[in-house]
């Protein structure tokens, strides 16, 4: 009996090890100044993997099987580290200190006004000219097991890009055997500041950069969105999506209404580049979006704790960026779904607060779950 029990236990341990997800460290080359860029690849037993690099804590690749078992990369990006600096388009990067836009490149906090760099017309975009996406993060730890995980950190000095307070930011990528990639952002500060961290992955579920995403079906769990002015700063209105090209409450092809020139918001954004207010309670993990590629059969569900999600359809890609496998990236070749607080929240008291005080912890968690139909 004793030998039987021991044998069963050994078989169980062997089976667990055989199906364990792994985190494998490697190199992703170097920058022009000689700085070495490291990588960590998370992989599971279901054929899914995700590569993270230390430059920008970037999600450099996501390999997912299609309905026929064919494994392909469903994200845009570059094959060389230096391209993320010299040909930036925020492909898969961790964005901060403030993801999205801050109007007129300034905000006030406790009676003091802070001036930021205007790197998007009159506004500040994604933390400024040298935001978190262009910084080299430190790998804190990795783990293999039932889940594969890597945690990276970056310490932003007080005053970097105009933001107050020393900010210690962390991001943890976790891949499980259910083909769920979870991303957890955290931060603490030495002084009152504003923060909005998210991931800026560009997804094309076809796994083929030669085919755009206009046929992808999108569902957004959002009754309202925040319209923008001509510089893409929210007007403050929370407009119902019903009866507009922004109604994705039922699965709708991206290309169905993206060229509706009668809609002023479509004209301003050159398509979709808007914040949607996620239904449900902010702070709770709930479904924010579902994307399906009918051809490959891949489905991606986005769950998030954030109050909003930015839906962007690659409107500013013009074919001059050559990414993985020397593919030219064009308008509409990918979509972004970026959970976070609202654009320009530091300047709007009626928006969910972006403020972070000493002794408090910032948290933004999101899950990208993949399956096939």
Image: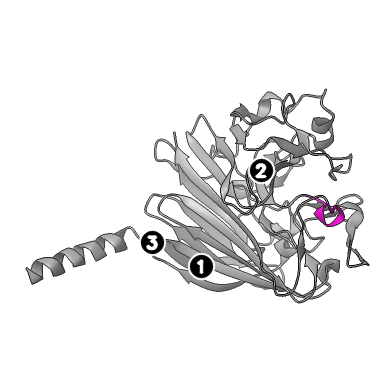
Q: Nearer the viewer, residue 344 or 259?
A: 344
Tell me: residue 271, above or below residue 324.
Answer: above
Instruction: Report the residue marked by disc 2.
Output: 278
Is 128 left, or right, of 10 in this rendering?
right
Residue for badge 1:
26
Q: Looking at the figure, which quarter contains the N terminus?
A: bottom left
Q: Position of residue 196 (x, y in %)?
A: 73, 59
Could you say whether the residue bearing mark 3 is in a helix, strand or loop?
Answer: loop
Residue 5 placement, left or right of 93: left
**Nearest to the observer: residue 126 or residue 275:** 275
What are the residue bounds of the magenta stretch?
343-349
Instruction: Report whether residue 184 is seen.
Output: yes
Characterize the local packing of mark 3: few (<14), some (14-19) or many (20 or more) Cα atoms within 10 angstroms: some
Q: Which circle's residue, 1 or 3, is located before the other in the chain?
A: 1
User: Spatial distance from mark 1 to mark 3, Cα to Cα?
Assistant: 21 Å
Residue at left offset 85%, top offset 52%: 348
Badge 2: residue crowd in 10 Å (few <14, some 14–19, many ≥20): many
On the image, numbered disc 3 is attached to which residue?
146
Relative to 203, say whether 173 is above or below.
below
- Quadrant of residue 173 in the image? bottom right
Can residue 80 be spotted in the picture? Answer: no
Q: Callout 1: helix, strand or loop?
A: strand
For residue 286, the mark is none
Verify CB contact (< 8 Å) between mark 1 and mark 3. no
The picture places residue 320, in percent across and down from the top left corner, at 75, 44
Quadrant of the image containing the C terminus:
top left
């Amino acid at each position: 009996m004793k030998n039987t029990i021991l044998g069963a236990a050994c078989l169980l341990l062997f089976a667990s090890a055989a199906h364990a997800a792994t985190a494998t460290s490697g190199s992703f080359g170097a920058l022009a100044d000689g700085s070495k860029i490291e990588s960590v690849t998370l992989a599971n037993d279901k054929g899914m993997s995700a590569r993270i690099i230390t430059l920008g804590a970037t999600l450099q690749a996501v390999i997912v099987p299609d309905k026929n078992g064919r494994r392909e990369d469903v994200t845009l990006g570059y094959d060389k580290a230096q391209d993320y600096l010299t040909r930036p388009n925020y492909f898969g990067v961790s964005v901060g200190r403030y993801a999205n836009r801050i109007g007129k490149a300034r905000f006030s906090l406790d009676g003091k006004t802070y001036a930021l760099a205007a790197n998007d017309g009159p506004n500040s975009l994604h933390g400024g000219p040298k935001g978190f996406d262009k910084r080299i993060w430190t790998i804190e730890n990795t783990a293999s097991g039932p889940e594969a995980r890597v945690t990276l950190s970056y310490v932003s000095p007080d005053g970097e890009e105009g933001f107050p307070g020393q900010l210690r930011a962390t991001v943890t990528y976790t891949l499980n055997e259910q083909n769920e990639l979870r991303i957890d952002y955290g931060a603490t500060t030495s002084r009152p500041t504003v923060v909005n961290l998210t991931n800026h992955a560009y997804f094309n579920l076809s796994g083929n950069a030669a085919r755009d995403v206009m046929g992808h079906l999108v569902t957004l769990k959002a009754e309202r969105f925040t319209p923008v002015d001509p510089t893409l700063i929210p007007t403050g209105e929370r407009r119902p999506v019903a009866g507009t090209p922004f109604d994705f409450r039922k699965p709708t092809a991206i290309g169905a209404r993206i060229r509706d020139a009668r809609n002023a918001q479509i004209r301003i954004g050159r398509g979709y580049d808007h914040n949607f207010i996620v239904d449900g309670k902010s702070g709770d993990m709930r479904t924010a979006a579902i994307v399906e590629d009918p051809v490959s059969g891949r489905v991606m569900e986005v769950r998030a704790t954030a109050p909003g999600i930015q839906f962007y359809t690659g409107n500013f890609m013009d074919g001059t960026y050559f990414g993985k496998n020397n593919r030219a990236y064009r308008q509409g070749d990918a979509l972004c779904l970026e959970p976070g607080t609202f654009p320009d929240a530091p300047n709007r008291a009626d928006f969910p607060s972006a403020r972070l005080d000493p002794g408090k912890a910032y948290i933004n968690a999101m899950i990208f779950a993949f399956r096939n139909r």
